[in-house]
Image (cartoon, rainbow, N blue to C red):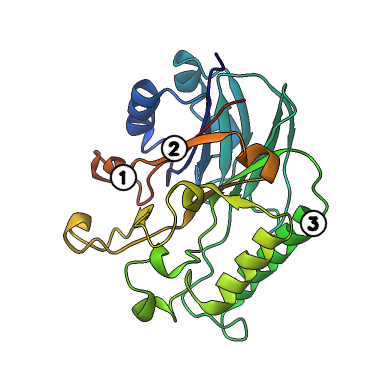
Amino acid sequence: MTTPLKIVSWNINSVRFRLDIVEQFLREMAPDILCLQETKVVDQDFPTDSFRALGYTHIVLHGQKMHHGVAIVSKVPLVEDDRFDWQANQEARHVGVRLESGLRIENVYVPAGGDVPDRAVNPKFGQKLDFLERMTQWSQGLTVPTVLVGDLNIAPLESDVWSHKQLLKTVSHTPIEVAAIDRLKASNSWVDLGRHFFPAPARLHTWWSYRSVDWTVNDRGRRLDHMWATADVAAKATRHHVYEECRSWLKPSDHVPIMTEFAI
C-alpha cells in the first residue's frame, strides 16, 4: 500500500511570532512537507531546533529581515534546492526543492501589489504583474514533475472571493491580475488542485483580513493560497483540504494552511 505524501502550504505571517500554532499544526496533522511564506526572519534566526524536534530535519531557507521570506521543512530528504528572483530585486520570495523521487516543489510568495490596480500610479502593482510574467516564462520551459505552492495573492475565480462584484477593482481580484494568473496556469497546463477537488462555485477561502473583529461573522474571505501541479503529478493527487479552523487559533495568521495528499 502506498503511503500518501502530504504537502502543506501556509503563509504564516512571522514564523517566530506564531511558532506555537505551527508546532500545534504539525503535531496534529503531521504533514510530510511544510512550505511557509512570509516567515519574516533571516536564515540564522529561523527556529530550526523547534522543527527538528518534531521530525522535520530537512530544512531549506530563503529568509529576509522583517519582510517576506520563504521556507520548506520536511520529514523526507531534500536533495536539491534553488531560489529564483522573480521580483528582480533580491527579495526572498521563492525557494524550491527536489525530492529523491524527482518531484520538485516550488514555494512562492507573490507580492501583494499595493492598493491601486494601476502600474502607472502604483509601482508595486507593476512589480506584481512583472513577477507573474517572469514566473510564466519559467513555467513555459518546465519539463519535470512539479508542485507549485504558495501565497499567489490572487483570487482568480468569481467564487474565490466573498463578493465578485464588490472586489472587481480591489487588488487580488482585478481582471488584469486574473488574466496574468490565467496565463501562468496555461503556460504548462497546471492543474489547480483546490478547484480540482472542490470545483467552482464551491466556497474555498484561505484568507480573512485582520480588520474584521470577528472573521466568522461576515466571512469576507478570499482564496489567495494555491497548490498547483503539473498534469503528471496532479493525476496522483488524492485529497485536498483547507484548514479553516486555524484562523481561530491563538495569534493566528490571516491565512490558513492548505494541504494536498499524493499517492507518490
User: Whole-percent x and y of residue 154?
Assistant: 51, 63
**Amino acid type of the residue tagged 2 in the rendering:** Val
Determine crowd level at label 2: few under 14, some 14-19, many 20+ residues with C-alpha closer than 10 A.
many
- Mark 2 secondary-structure assignment: loop
Is residue 88 at all visible to an observer of this figure?
Answer: no
Evaluate if marks 1 and 2 touch, with contact meaning CB atoms under 8 Å apart. Answer: no
Is residue 167 depicted above or below 55 in this figure?
A: below
Q: Earlier in the sequence, mark 3 or mark 2?
A: 2
- Residue in the picture at 23% in, 44% down: 248
User: Whole-percent x and y of residue 38?
Assistant: 50, 47
Task: Give the residue at mark 2.
Answer: 15
When asked about the image quadrant of residue 106, the answer is top right
**Amino acid type of the residue tagged 3 in the rendering:** Gln
Q: Nearer the viewer, residue 263 or 104?
A: 263
Q: Earlier in the sequence, mark 3 or mark 1?
A: 3
- Residue in the picture at 66% in, 19% down: 77
Q: CA distance from mark 3 to mark 2?
A: 32 Å
Q: CA distance from mark 1 to mark 2?
A: 18 Å
Horizontally, is 157 left or right of 232 in the view? left
Looking at the rendered image, the quarter that the C terminus falls into is top right
Q: Which mark is residue 140?
A: 3
Task: Give the residue at mark 1.
Answer: 244
